[in-house]
Amino acid sequence: MKTLKDVKVGQRARVVKLHGEGAVKRRIMDMGLTKGVEIYVRKLAPLGDPIEINIRGYELSLRKSDSEMIEVE
């Protein structure tokens, strides 16, 4: 299983599935990360946390722990 955390800077990926439960999963979905959406990994902080992505025409920063819950292809 490949997660968003595994995607390198400059690569694109498509969301396959969201893992997690309850409020955490709802928060991720509210940010626009839903099944089938394409993600472009724009930047990675020097220590690897957070990760900056482009999604649905806007920029979003995600914690490493959140990016591990997003399965991509």
Image: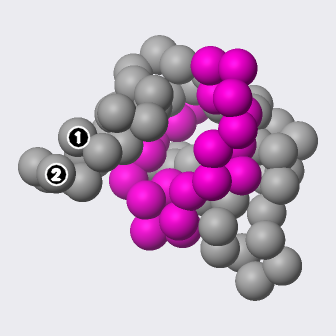
Would you name the residue on which mark 2 appears?
23
Q: Residue at x 36, y 43 (%)?
A: 28
Residue 69: % across, % down: 38, 53
Q: Residue at x 47, y 16 (%)?
A: 36
Report, in whole angstroms, how far the alpha carbon at label 2 lies from the one at label 1. 5 Å
SS for tag 2?
A: helix
Position of 32 relative to 9 (above/below): above
Give the amino acid type for the residue marked by disc 1 in the picture.
Answer: Arg
Residue 24: % across, % down: 24, 54
Within 10 Å of disc 1 (Cα), the crowding (few <14, some 14-19, many 20+) is: few
Numbered label attached to residue 4:
none
Looking at the rendering, which quadrant does residue 32 occupy?
Answer: top left
Position of 12 relative to 1 (above/below): above
Numbered label attached to residue 26:
1
Residue 37: % across, % down: 53, 19
Residue 59: % across, % down: 70, 38
Position of 14 relative to 48 (above/below): above
Q: Are marks 2 and 1 in contact (CB under 8 Å)?
A: yes
Residue 16 appears in the rendering: no
Q: Nearer the viewer, residue 10 or 73?
A: 10
In the orientation shown, which residue stands out farthest toward the right? Answer: 10
Q: Is residue 51 magenta?
A: no
In the orientation shown, which residue stands out farthest toward the left? Answer: 22
User: In this rendering, would 32 be left or right of 42?
Assistant: left
User: In this rendering, would 4 be left or right of 70?
Assistant: right
Q: Nearer the viewer, residue 58 or 9?
A: 58
Q: Residue at x 63, y 53 (%)?
A: 61
Residue 62 appears in the rendering: yes
Q: Which residues are magenta?
A: 52-73
Give the amino acid type for the residue marked by disc 2 in the picture.
Answer: Ala
Q: Residue at x 52, y 50 (%)?
A: 3
Within 10 Å of disc 2 (Cα), the crowding (few <14, some 14-19, many 20+) is: few
